Amino acid sequence: MEIKQKNKRSNAALVLREVRKSREKGGVLFELKIPFMSVLKGEFLAVVGLSGCGKSTLLDMLGLVLKPTSAREFQLNIGTEDRKQNQIMDLVEKDLALIRKESIGYVLQTGGLLPFLSVENNILLPCRLNRKRDSNTVFDLVKRLGISDQLSKKTQHLSGGQRQRVAIARALACRPPLVLADEPTAAVDKLTAIEIRNEFRELTQKMGVTLILVTHDLELVKNVADRIFTFHVEKKSKNHTVSTIYERKNGTGNHR
Amino acid sequence: MDKPARRMGDHLGIVFQLSRADLRHEWVLTICLIMAVTAVLSPLMILFGLKFGTIEVLRFRLVQDPRNREMRPLTSKSFTKEWFNKLRSREDVSFIVPTTRQISASVEARVTGDSVNEVQKKIALNIIPTDDGDRLIMENGASIPTIDQCVLTNAAAEELGAKSGDTLFVTVKRYRSSRYEKGQLSLKVTGVLSERASTLKSIYVRLEILEAVESFKDGQAVPEYGWEGSTPKAYPRYDGLVVILPKKLNKVEEFKLINNSGFTKIELMTTEELLERAGYLLSPGKTIYLLSTKRKPAGNENVRSIRSRLRGFEAILIPWVRGLNAELVDNSNHVLTTLSLLSLSIPLEKAVAIGMVPIPTWGSEVDAGVNNSDTTQWRKIMLPKSIKIPDSSVQLRITRDDDSLIFPVQIVSDLVPHEIEQRNTAFVPARLAGILNLFKLRNITFDNRISEFVLSRRGYAGFRLYASTIDDVDRIRQHLEEEGIPVHTEAERIRDVSELDTYLTLIFWLIAAVGIIGGVAALMASLYASVERKRKDLSILRLIGLSGASLLRFPIYQGIIIAVGGVCMAFLFFESLAWIINSLFSSHLQVEESLCCLSIWHLLIILGTTVAVAVLAGTIAAWRVTRIEPAEALRDE
């Protein structure tokens, strides 16, 4: 049992234990509690919740742009080095920027693409920042995502679905160990959303990339994500809301 | 380069490409910003170009025309050779040549005809000295003439019908002894000055010719050109007069001796004091007075005046000079001995009567006519016993500053007794002592041909001076005025141009300050607004790993690109407008002159300043960039 636990821990891309983040906005205190959350390498983890439940706060912390108020453990086991909670807590912006650049890919709601760059340059930007250029990966990615014909275009000339595909290509272009996707299909129709989800899932699975997808649409990830986390929101008082994250049973449980 | 530094360098390259791509993406806005910079710079460049061009045209004309560097004295004074040498050694003086008195600087000239019967027009010309390095001649199409050549002004050449290569027949006239006399010489015309050099009818010749003309007009002979006349003989000048009387004068009689006699002081002396001051001894019982002058030395006329006032007093007069240092040299100019010369002239019988020691063998020549040119009678010397000169063919040399007077002298005695010898004291006739005393004040030469002491020219009445640059003119003017020499210069005109430059610069900077402040504000606001507008894009860049330190260069690079674009556009506008302005005023401009122009240095300074201003404006916007959090990219989605 102990060996299994040890193997599981070494295989974890991310371990969060007793992490708490408090934020005050307009006199209302919002508290996000994560009793325990671990994400295994190559796992597809979905975080589902309604507006205001703390999805963005969780994503900010996972994306290393927001530090938790307190944490017993915040272990990031991606890249070449283990980065434990204390290190994460103590790291300065410069180091966090380096981890973001080298180890995390982002897919944002409407793509988060830069309008002044062509599709190709948008996709290649993280590789250029990391001084990596894997032409085969990029070529394979754009081919599989069906955006080979769009490379020279400016992003504003793309449809919503194409834009998200470009964002996925950019997030995966330099093979980061972790990809965070924030409502990647919110701006497209249901059919396209399913297509994008499937392509995204296939690519991350094939590349062995850990995917954390945040969405409000449980149907999109139910029976597709390996595990699903959701929020229990409790209104302690008029001005104090506590949201606690826990694991649902709707996941495939493939990585368990 | 270490790894982080290289990474930073790479990021800077990416940031530059990103900022360039963003400007290209928003090209309409970018053109608007570039035009805004152009709108600020173009009028300033035109304004500065006009100011610079105008001032440069004025300065160019001032610099080009040597007349603007010419300085002439407004008063006539005697300038010595030493004074000229001193001034010539100044770095800010490019050229200086002495001039003679204006009244002596006119001649008549005509071109020598091809045939005897051809009558050429004779005109009066100003004669002006020139010398090597004369800017007026050299910068106006002629070369410096030699001693038998001349250069004419354009007006003179036209009037004479002369051209380069012609021979000019020059006539100098004087009025002497109730009749007109002429001196003539031929000069070859080597050049005609361009019209701008002078509007006067003038002839430029070597200073020696001008000196000859002046000497001739003063009635003197000029043997070099065969012009006859007198010789300016040197005359004796004494510091005082020893008066020996049988009895003392009363106060009134004493006063008479210094009242309008040329002498200003009378002293009663003992024989010891006489020995000390004049070097000779008398037997006791005589009354001895020393009449002396304070400033102006006395001449023979003053001695004669005293003689007439003391008629009936049985007075003996011996002119006196303060000790004169001289050297006896042989024919090879080797110094035989140095001496202190004293004046002594007295008739033999009178010297015996008053018990004088020593007794001169040459008697008294003071009363002899001043026109007596037989200098051999008084070019004599009595040496002390201690000095033995084996060869009697010796010369006496007396030196003053860097000039010396040397002439043959006859040793008539070397028996000055020991009892009166004081530090190599020798005696010379009073007339010789007087002439040597004059040498302290005037240049004298001994003309061996006529065995006569001749006065050299005293000095020069004026000068022609050229400053090295127009900026030196005012400094030299101040220097000369401090010496009490008011001068005519073009300093006022030069100062006017400098003042115009100062005022135009001030006006330009006032306008430029407003323009620059407006430009900075516009650029700063635009870049700041651009950062605000791109907040989301910049936060995405922060999110995917660009550090704040790298990204803050984003608006700075954009500012630089806009500034460079603005300068290039402004330069194109400036060049076009400057071409139009210069074309419009081309009829008033000479070749190489531009009314509106900028130097390459100005363009570089404008580029540098604009880029610096853009960096400043970009830095304010960059400060805003550093406030953008990467979380904004996630949250704003």
Image: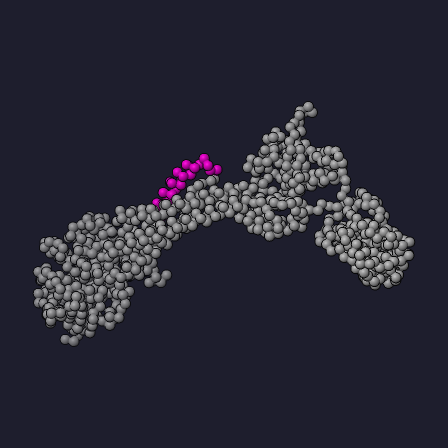
Residue at 20% x, 72% y is A70
Magenta segment: B566-591
Give the residue displayed 16% in from the left and 69% down from the top.
A29
Position of the N terminus of chain B, as image quadrant, is: bottom left
Image location of residue B512, percent across then percent down: 38, 50
Q: Nearer the viewer, residue B220 or A125?
A: B220
Instruction: Give me the residue at 12% from left, 62% from top.
Output: A51
Q: Position of residue B228 (x, y in %)?
A: 76, 37
Colour pattern: one colour
The quadrant of the rendering that contains the C terminus of chain B is: bottom left
| Residue A93 lies within the magenta run | no
Is B590 included in the stretch rendered in magenta?
yes
Looking at the picture, tell me which residue is in the foreground, B195 or B391.
Answer: B195
Front in this rendered view, residue B491 or B175? B175
Q: Is residue A194 visible?
A: yes
Q: Tell me residue B619's x, y (percent).
A: 32, 57
Name the residue located 14 percent from the left edge and 55 percent from the top edge: A187
Q: Is residue B91 above or below residue A213?
A: above
Magenta segment's dominant SS is helix
Q: Is residue A47 above or below residue B26?
A: below
Please tell me whether residue B138 is drawn above or below residue B631 in the rendered image. above
Q: Is residue B577 left or right of residue B324?
A: left
Q: How many marks?
A: 0
Task: Find the residue positioned furthest to the bottom.
Answer: A2
Q: Would you say residue B544 is visible in this rendering?
A: no
Q: Residue furthest top?
A: B117
